[in-house]
Image (spheres, rainbow, N blue to C red):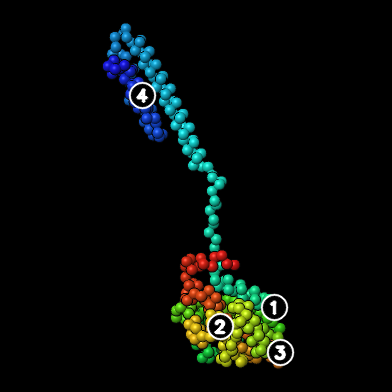
Amino acid sequence: MGDSSSEDPVARVLAQFEQDTAQGTRSRSDFERLKGRFLGRDRGLVPALFANVKALPPSERAAFGARANAAKREIEEAIARLGEDLSRREQRAREASETVDVTLPGRRPRLGGLHPVTIVRRRIEQIFLRMGYSIADGPEIENDRYNFEALNFPPEHPARDSQDTFFVDRRASSPLLLRTHTSPVQIREMKKRGAPLKIIVPGRVYRNESVDATHAAVFNQVEGLAVDRGISLADLKGTVEEFFGALFGRETRARFIPTFFPFVEPGVDVAASCIFCKGRGCGKCKGSGWIELAGAGLVHPKVLAGCGIDPEEFSGFAFGLGLDRVAMLLYEFPDLRLLLDGDERFLRQFARQT
Ligand code: PHE
């Protein structure tokens, strides 16, 4: 070839084609560029060859035309092959990216978990279900009559001050409020079902509290109510001890200290022996050996009578337990607000428990 090839347009185009395809064609766009450069109708190098024909002496035209046609065929065929190669490679790449490697380990779905309050509520429900209680429920928007009056809190009674709440509608015949405790469900259930009766009532309650590590404006209680013939404070004590034993461990004891709630008589503050120091006194129980968890007492005769239950025939006990406090104790976290923040770093730690 040498010099003659650089002077001969057909040889030049073939040489150019060889050079351009020496590296192979990598991508679809490389290929399209190559194809346009040689075969493009307007500026393609191959069609341009034929423009030379007119400039040749007639005697050379036939030979030149034959060689140009041969070159054209050669280049067209080579480009067709390159196109097929490229399509095959693209197909293989598609298949590779779409294949599922069945030997890869599966991706574990992120499972949600139960909220610590739910875990504790369910444990408590199980304990009382075993003791023959059933589970009752009541509205969180309660009326003043059930939240206070039927529970022997007269209007303006100072005992209401400890349960300041959020009023929803003060104009209703009995003002509507967010219930401050689960005790109104005592009234609802006694009115509905009469005596004898054994229920627990887990539920959310509300108070107008300044929020800090141990006080929240929304929290959870479990109410307990047992009404039957001959119920005494000893039954309450035995029940609470059995409950604490099941929840915190058998060595746990219960302590009653007299206090006032208008709907019980007598009323008691209930404490459990400290589950950390077993009652010897430690930081968690502030050295006292006891941790206060509930209010309780014998149902006030006026409350029974108000629900149509004869206090001469029946007596009962009731207790109200702070569920969030129990969760704090069992799981040893320092701040009640963690229960409401929805922070996954906290909640994740309970995800495997049911
Ligand atoms: N309802 C009372 C409170 O929330 C607790 C309680 C319940 C006390 C039942 C006595 C009997 O403070």
Q: Is residue 285 left or right of residue 60?
A: right
User: Looking at this view, is 172 or 122 the one in front?
Assistant: 122
Q: Which residue is mark 2?
A: 278
Mark 1 Cβ and ligand 1 under 8 Å apart:
no
Q: Is residue 73 left or right of residue 250?
A: left
Q: Residue at x 61, y 88 (%)?
A: 297
**Disc number placed over residue 132 in the picture, else none:** 1
Q: CB atoms at circles 3 and 4 under 8 Å apart?
A: no
Q: CB atoms at circles 3 and 2 under 8 Å apart?
A: no
- Type of the residue with mark 2: Lys
> Disc 3 or 4, which lies upstream in sequence?
4
Q: Which quadrant would the C terminus be assigned to in this image? A: bottom right
> Disc 1 or 2, which lies upstream in sequence?
1
> Disc 4 or 2, which lies upstream in sequence?
4
Q: Which residue is mark 4?
A: 18
Q: Position of residue 15 (x, y in %)?
A: 33, 21
User: Looking at this view, is 188 or 174 the one in front?
Assistant: 188
Q: State whether residue 134 appears in this view.
A: no
Q: Residue at x 61, y 92 (%)?
A: 266
Mark 2 neighbour class, 10 Å CA radius: few under 14, some 14 to 19, many 20 or more: some
* Count of numbered labels shown in the rendering: 4
Kindly report which numbered mark, 3 or 2, lies closer to the viewer in this rendering: 2
- Type of the residue with mark 4: Glu
Q: Which residue is mark 3?
A: 230
Q: CB atoms at circles 1 and 2 under 8 Å apart?
A: no
- Type of the residue with mark 1: Gly
